[in-house]
Amino acid sequence: MGRLVLFNTRGDGMAVNAYLIFDGNTREVVQFYVKVFGLEEPQFMTFGSIHAEEIPPEARELIMHTYLEIAGDKVMFSDNFPGMPYQQGNNFTLAYISSDEAAIRDAFQKLKDGGSVKMELQETPWSKCYGSLTDKYNIQWQFSHEA
C-alpha cells in the first residue's frame, strides 16, 4: 500500500494513509499482518479504553485504533464502531494526517461541501483536532492533527 505525501509551503510533511475497518476481527487481522511482514505487535486502543461508559460491554474490547508500519508506510486499522452499518468492500477511509491545523481545517471545510459530516473537528484524547466526513463522492475521510 502506498502513501501519498504532500508538502505545504513551509515544507512540513503531511500524509494521506489508508485506514482499514473490520467487523470485529481487527486484532486477528493485525496479528496476521504482523506475522506476514515480520513486525512487532502494535499497541491496541480499544473503544472501551476511551469511551467505556458509552460503549456496550460486549463492544469495549473492539479495536478503536492501531497501526502498522509496512514497508515504510503507515496502515491504520479499526473495528467498525458498534451499531454502525458495515459492508465489506467499503471498509476503508482515507486519513489526512498533518501537523498543520489550518490545513486540516481548510481541507475539512472544502470536503464537507456537498458531503456529510460524521464528526465535526474537535479535540480528542488522541488529537488536538480530529474529525470525519464523507465527501460528495462517497469517500470517507478522517482528519487528525499530529504534532
Image: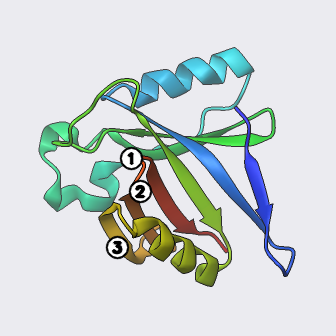
Q: Which residue in the rendered view is the most extreme toward the right?
A: 11
Mark 2 and mark 3: Cα distance apart in space: 13 Å
Inspect the image, locate mark 2, and give the three-letter code of the amino acid beneath it: Asp
| Residue located beneath label 1 in the image | 138
In front here: 12 or 39? 12
Which residue is rendered at x = 60% and y = 84% of the image?
A: 102
| Residue located beneath label 3 in the image | 120
2 or 3: tag closer to the N-terminus: 3
Which residue is rendered at x = 31% and y = 39% of the image?
A: 80
Image coordinates of residue 71 in percent, x first then y, are: 80, 32
Inspect the image, locate mark 1, and give the three-letter code of the amino acid beneath it: Asn
| Count of residue discs | 3
Element at label 1: loop
Left of 33 or right of it: where is 113?
left
User: Which quadrant of the view contains residue 39?
Assistant: top right
3 or 1: tag closer to the N-terminus: 3
In front here: 115 or 65? 115
Figure check: 68 above or below 127: above
Badge 1 density bin: few <14, some 14–19, many ≥20, Cα 10 Å = few
Mark 1 and mark 2: Cα distance apart in space: 5 Å
Badge 2 density bin: few <14, some 14–19, many ≥20, Cα 10 Å = some
| Labels 3, 1: front one | 1
